[in-house]
Image (tube, rainbow, N blue to C red):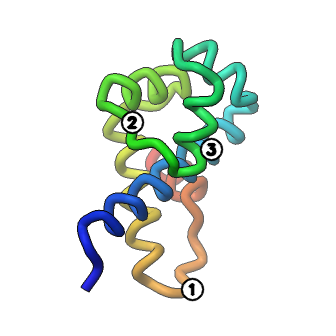
Amino acid sequence: MRSEQTIARTFQARFGSVVRSQRQSAGLSQEELAHRSGLHRTYVTDVERGARNPSLNSIKKLSDALGVSLSELFSIVEGAEREDRVPDSGSGASELHESTK
């Protein structure tokens, strides 16, 4: 059984991966995302690497800067979590994002 700390790190990494994917899909650099969100570039980098546990305020700033709602952003993260549990599902977070539009 995985510890709560391991689960939290896994979620942070998954969330960061989704932020990176959404940023790249939007054609934004980390610097531009940081500027639009009002967060520091190194903080955005750390979020994307899963090294930070962002607050709800930071998550809201990121979702606004990415042009997605909080619910949509978390839906993409949840889809990525389901994919982690189901091997060879063949569907990426960006495909899930496109199907929810």
Q: Amino acid at mark 3?
A: Arg
Left or right: where does residue 73 sit relative to residue 37?
A: left
Q: CA distance from mark 3 to mark 2?
A: 14 Å
Q: Amino acid at mark 1?
A: Asp
Residue labelled with disc 1? 88
Within 10 Å of the Cα at label 3, are there few (<14), some (14-19), or many (20+) other Cα atoms? many
| CB atoms of marks 2 and 1 within 8 Å | no
Q: CA distance from mark 3 to mark 1?
A: 22 Å
Task: Indicate which disc residue 20 carries.
Answer: 3
Residue at point 57% right, 70% down?
91
Q: Amino acid at mark 2?
A: Pro
Say which of 90 and 1 sits in front.
1
| Label 3 SS | helix
Q: Residue 23 appears in which quarter of the rendering?
A: top right
Q: Residue 95 appears in which quarter of the rendering?
A: bottom right
Query: How many numbered dots are placed on residues in this image?
Result: 3
* 8 lies above or below 85: above
